[in-house]
Amino acid sequence: MMQIFVPLNFLGFVYREIKASMANIEKMFDLLKIKSQVPESSDASVLKVDHGDIEFNGVCFSYDERQIIKNLNFAVRAGEKVAIVGSSGAGKSTVAKLLFRFYDIDEGSIRIDGQDIQTVTHHSLRSSIGVVPQDCVLFNTSLLENVRYGRPDASEQEVSEALRLAHLDSFISQLPNGLDTEVGERGLKLSGGEKQRVAIARTILKQPKILLFDEATSSLDSHSEKAVLEAIEAVSKGKTSLMIAHRLSTIVNADRILVLEEGEVREQGSHAELLALGGLYSRLWAVQQHEETE
Ligand code: ATP
């Protein structure tokens, strides 16, 4: 018994560490507002996204001298939902940053619909990928303005459709001022789940072919989590989705799960396949199940 308890206890520690460090990825989204340090070539073309295929081919990347990503190969096909999981420091948010070309890679290529991201404009690349961050930035204005931010010229009908898909319509119908309700400083008058669904509604309006989800359901109670997961399901239908996740229970339905360790894909498959494999993923799963029933 002791033999099982000790590793499980250790993995529990690792998992808590992972959870605590998850806040770091939010910083990545601040980078979206910072001008990229990577130069844009003078003959850069506009990225044309027809399907939304993503390919990482033999990607190597180092921060300073330290190699973080080692010969990374994976593809996300149009319409596929792929989750990236792994312990803290495995390189998950680095993969997302490389997709946005915040840094240039040392070797290999990253392609979207066959176009190398090093050959396209920053603007066309970043506006093609919709991001649903863990903690979205809301402005101290009405709900309508906050959702419209996704695409200021969206029609009222398009806004209503986005709200419906993001499972916000019944919540809004209960508010005396409906869509004109002020959300308060940084959205303080909304719950965490409502804020995330506003972020999802914004992304729906933006209509990107590619979606990147930061662990969008952390720190929510199970009722709000369910609403957010349903909204994610609706928005990601038919779109290429990359989900960076720590809580494995939120990504069990992904078409494919990549388990990253030390910058390499160590395991990949569906939730059921990875459990059957009995490796790293299944150990993380056992720990998280154990923690959730504690
Ligand atoms: P976490 O779950 O803790 O967010 P992660 O899997 O997302 O981890 P990354 O943020 O991709 O991991 O970091 C991978 C490694 O790269 C870590 O060891 C980290 O310390 C290092 N690293 C991240 N950003 C930088 C940077 N800007 N400069 C130098 N090293 C960095």
Image (cartoon, rainbow, N blue to C red):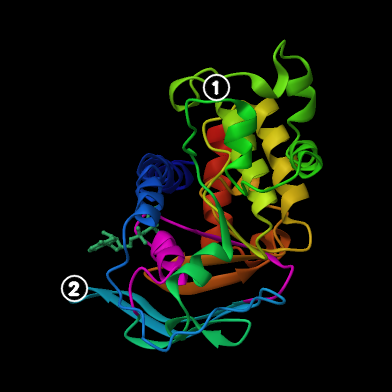
In the rendering, which numbered label is found on residue 183?
1
Q: Is residue 81 magenta?
A: yes
Residue 211 located left or right of residue 13 = right
Q: Residues within 10 Å of mark 1 (few under 14, many from 20)?
A: many
Q: What residue is shown at x 51% (from left), y 46% (from top)? A: 133
Residue 252 appearing in the image: yes
Which x, y percent locates residue 75? 61, 78
Residue 186 located left or right of residue 273 = left
Q: Is residue 192 above or below residue 252?
A: above
* Ligand 1 picture quarter: bottom left
On whether ligand 1 comes within 8 Å of the CB at mark 2, the answer is yes
Q: What residue is shown at x 44% (from left), y 61% (from top)? A: 92
Which of the two labelled residues, at mark 2 and mark 1, occupies the earlier sequence position?
A: 2
Q: What residue is shown at x 77% (from left), y 48% (from top)? A: 234
Residue 251 appearing in the image: no
For this rendering, which residue is in front, 59 or 136?
A: 136
In the rendering, which numbered label is found on residue 64?
2
Q: Amino acid at mark 2?
A: Asp
Which x, y percent locates residue 25? 39, 50
Q: Amino acid at mark 1?
A: Val
For this rendering, which residue is in front, 24 or 275?
A: 24
For this rendering, which residue is in front, 57 or 10?
A: 57
Q: Which residues are magenta?
A: 76-104
Secondary structure found at label 2? loop
Q: Residue furthest left?
A: 65
Q: CA distance from mark 2 to mark 1?
A: 42 Å
On whether ligand 1 comes within 8 Å of the CB at mark 1, the answer is no
Secondary structure found at label 1? loop
